Amino acid sequence: MKILLYNPDNGVTRNFMPHLWMFLLQALTPPGHEVLLVDGNARAMNEEELVAFAREEGVELVGIGAMTRMVARAYKVADALRAAGFKVVMGGPHVTEVPDEALGRDGGPRHADAVALGEADETWPLLVEDAARGELKEVYQPERDAKGLDRKPTLQPYPIIPWDKLEIEQFSLVPKFLRPLMNRLGGGWGSFYVVPIETGRGCPYGCEFCTVTGFFGDSIRFRTNESVVEELLLLKERARRERGQFAAFFIDDNLAINIKRVKSLLRDIIAADAQVPWVAQISANLLKDEELVDLIHESGGKWIFIGMESIDPANMADVNKNFSKPGEYGAVLERLARRNIYAITSFIFGMDNDTKGVAGRTLSEIKSWPPGLPVFGQLTPFPATPLYDRLQKAGRLTRPKHWMDFAPFVMAHTPLKMTIEEAKTEVKEAWTASYSPERNAEAVNSIDEKHVKYRIINFVARLFFRGIYFPQMGKRAWMKVLFENRKTISQLTRQGIAAARAAKKEERARLATAPSTEAQPKASEAR
Ligand code: B12
Ligand code: SF4
């Protein structure tokens, strides 16, 4: 049977990195079936084009996965495919949280023939075999334990995702028009991939707005260190073979949730020489451990995503995230920066204690920290979260099915101390000020005691992150950004050339003063 797995485009981050679920389910598909992957973020197709593609390819089953914010788009695609006679199964967080919607059991139209609820690692092979026999059921759900909860996959063993062979050209982060130039610059920068790798699942913290504790459970399950190390070695081998740049995004919700275990993983990565540059999500409270931060550095950690949410402790208490202390954020970021590790700091506006001016207050705090990549959003009640239930009970949801008419950065409930419109304005102000050419220059200059490569990396990352709020997908948009930031670009170029010359000079001096065996070519080579 030919299966198509489809991920709808999110309209924002586009091809930032592949979605793990598609590659994982492909690896878990029983032998004898062929799986095609289409990520709408990297390969845009409208409904008609997708239907035509599925027909041409002779697809017999379509699997669609979606987060809440893409689910309306996912339903549209599913409707078109079903109207054309294809069997459609949907999975992922949203359908798990609101399964009746996809199946049309809530009075609305039906969008899927079947849904796979929760973690599908063990149900997917059964579903595929049922579909192949023409016996697809409506609902696939993990078996239940004695307490009536989903029995979660152990992640041991974990399937091999062949990153060394997979076709991922569409996910290169270097804009097409810049590739020839970047190739000429060398260093493998003509292509740059970020690849998702999970090392464990589950989070016990239960923050009020988050779906993770509900979906993956509060008990954490880890892959073996060996299987993670093997996956990293595949990436490293590909990077070497293709002379390209590959980074890993450890997508665990909190990589350091078990300090002892993460240290042992990082030590094993170092021992196996499996380091690739990596990014991971770690909460601020776990980054106080100096030894951990040393290991992050030694194992290739470059950027840490920290869900800071708010600089107001009252807001943190409101959303059950008291374990993360705003007063400690500065010290945590300094600790990372001392090892040249920087942070992607995520903030939420529109919390119940937020008032007008929250953007300005947050920005001035951010400016007192080492330069990171701040991202901003608004508090969103995702279905099946404690936040959703609280707001619903209080009658505060203004758009209870906000996902069906998705509006970027528009809240679905009214915060207590500001309006929905004000919250949107604050988010916009925060993005605009954080990635303005002036702020980019200021951020880069604030680390002028560091090697120029760190300033360049910081600057390039800022240009990409700016694109999350101000999409800059085409050549024109990029040219505009480059033009606006021309002063910083020429400053960094001058500094980069000077640093390269100094390094060469130093190397020549070193060779000149080195013992003759090292400095002189061997007699055989000289001839
Ligand atoms: C990586 C990630 C991202 C990446 C996404 C890009 C990418 N290429 O992956 C980035 C960093 C960009 C991102 C951004 C956002 N994210 Co995010 N993200 C994640 C994260 C940490 C990991 C996703 C993952 O790969 N998980 C591992 C895989 C194996 O799990 P899975 O996807 O759930 O798939 C399993 C099952 O669901 C099922 N399955 C999934 N799809 C399908 C399809 C079929 C057909 C079948 C049969 C089964 C199936 O099978 C898989 C194996 O069991 C999750 C949290 C988490 N732990 O999952 C949040 C999460 C998905 N994100 C979330 C959110 C809210 C966001 C943002 C909206 C945040 C914001 N406010 O801006 C943005 C929006 C993104 C966008 N622009 O659209 C929420 C989604 C909640 C919801 N109900 O939709 C999550 C669950 C985290 C949370 N805090 O609640 N995110
Ligand atoms: S926000 Fe992060 S720490 Fe809080 S429950 Fe979700 S995954 Fe866990």
Image: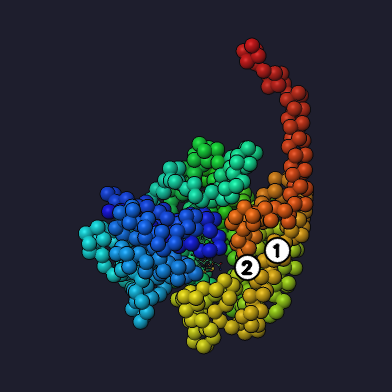
How many marks are shown on the rendered structure? Answer: 2
* Occupied quadrant, residue 165: top left
**Side (left or right) of 407 relative to 477:** left
Give the quarter of the figure containing the C terminus. Answer: top right
Locate residue 348: give its quadrant.
Answer: bottom right
Q: Is residue 82 visible?
A: yes
- Residue 310 seen from this side: no
Q: Of 109 and 139, which appears nearest the observer? A: 109
Q: Amino acid at mark 1?
A: Ser
The image position of residue 49, as x and y in percent, is: 41, 59
Q: Which residue is located at x 65 percent, y 63 percent?
A: 374
198 horizontally vs 317: left or right: left
Is 42 above or below relative to 98?
above
Label 2: element kind:
strand
Q: Which residue is mark 2?
A: 376
From this view, report whether residue 291 is shown above or below residue 429.
Answer: above
Q: Give the camera-side residue of 504 and 255.
A: 504
Q: Are marks 2 and 1 in contact (CB under 8 Å)?
A: yes
- The amino acid pointed to by label 2 is Phe
- The residue to which callout 1 is attached is 434
Say whether disc 2 or disc 1 marks the residue closer to the N-terminus: 2
Residue 89 coordinates in the image, percent (x, y): 34, 65
User: What residue appears at the point 65 percent right and 60 percent down from the top-left corner?
Assistant: 466
Classed neighbour count for the residue bearing mark 2: other residues with Cα under 10 Å, few (<14), some (14–19), many (≥20)? many
The tag on residue 9 is none
